[in-house]
Every structure is written in C-alpha cells, then in structure tokens.
Image: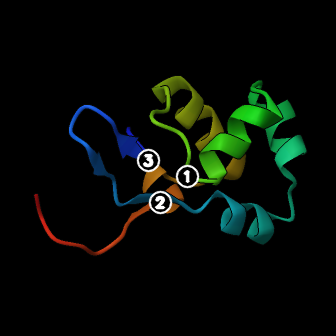
C-alpha cells in the first residue's frame, strides 16, 4: 500500500493514515505499538505522519492484530480529482 508522494508519476497520493486517532482510541502510545509490533518508533512515525511510501503487508497485519482493527480502519482516501 503506497502512502505519500509518487515520485515516478509526479503526483501526490490522497491516502492518509489514521494511526494517531486509533492509538488515542486504544489508549496506546506509538512506543508501545512499536514494541508490540516489532518495528521502530521511527518507522511508525513515518507512517502516522503520512511520509511513508509503502508498508509491508506483514507490518500492516501486525499493526492490525495489535490494534484489533482492519486495514481500512487505518487508512482513508481524501477526496480529489481522478487522474
């Protein structure tokens, strides 16, 4: 799943990560999620700040398992014109 700027196409993706909102709802910190998922805080910060260009399905699966959510709960697509 690609999030952020697509340099090859020269366009900006409209996919946005809702990780901050979900963490707040769960009463969990990024540090705790990183520990439980087995990734770095830096990697999760890149994702939650919408600077990530991609996410491994294994990482996405682990995040969803820890947060008891679905991938669609983590990401939204902002309205905009179609390419």
Residue 60, placed above or below residue 18: above
Tag of residue 4 = 3
Quadrant of the rendering where the N terminus is positioned = top left
The reply to whether dot 2 and dot 1 touch (C-beta < 8 Å) is: yes
Task: Read off the residue under disc 2.
Answer: 16
Q: Secondary structure at mark 1?
A: loop
Distance from the alpha carbon under mark 1 to that under mark 3? 6 Å
Distance from the alpha carbon under mark 2 to that under mark 1? 6 Å
Residue 4, placed above or below residue 83: above
Residue 32 x %, y %: 89, 43
Q: Residues within 10 Å of mark 2 (few under 14, many from 20)?
A: many
Q: Is residue 72 left or right of residue 8?
A: right
Residue 14, placed above or below residue 30: below
The reply to whether dot 1 and dot 3 touch (C-beta < 8 Å) is: yes
Residue at 79% x, 68% y: name it: 24
Disc on the earlier residue, 1 or 3:
3
Quadrant of the rendering where the C terminus is positioned = bottom left
Distance from the alpha carbon under mark 3 to that under mark 2? 8 Å
Q: Is residue 5 left or right of residue 59?
A: left
Disc on the earlier residue, 2 or 1:
2
Residue 14 x %, y %: 35, 60
Label 3 or label 2, whichever lies nearer to me, is: 3
Task: Read off the residue under disc 1.
Answer: 50
């Amino acid at each position: 799943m690609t999030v952020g700027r697509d340099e090859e196409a020269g366009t900006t993706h409209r996919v946005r990560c809702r990780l901050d909102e979900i963490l707040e709802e769960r009463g969990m910190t990024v540090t705790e999620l990183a520990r439980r998922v087995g990734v770095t805080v830096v990697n999760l910060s890149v994702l939650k700040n919408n600077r990530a260009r991609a996410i491994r399905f294994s990482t996405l699966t682990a995040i969803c398992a820890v947060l008891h959510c679905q991938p669609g709960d983590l990401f939204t697509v902002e309205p905009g014109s179609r390419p």
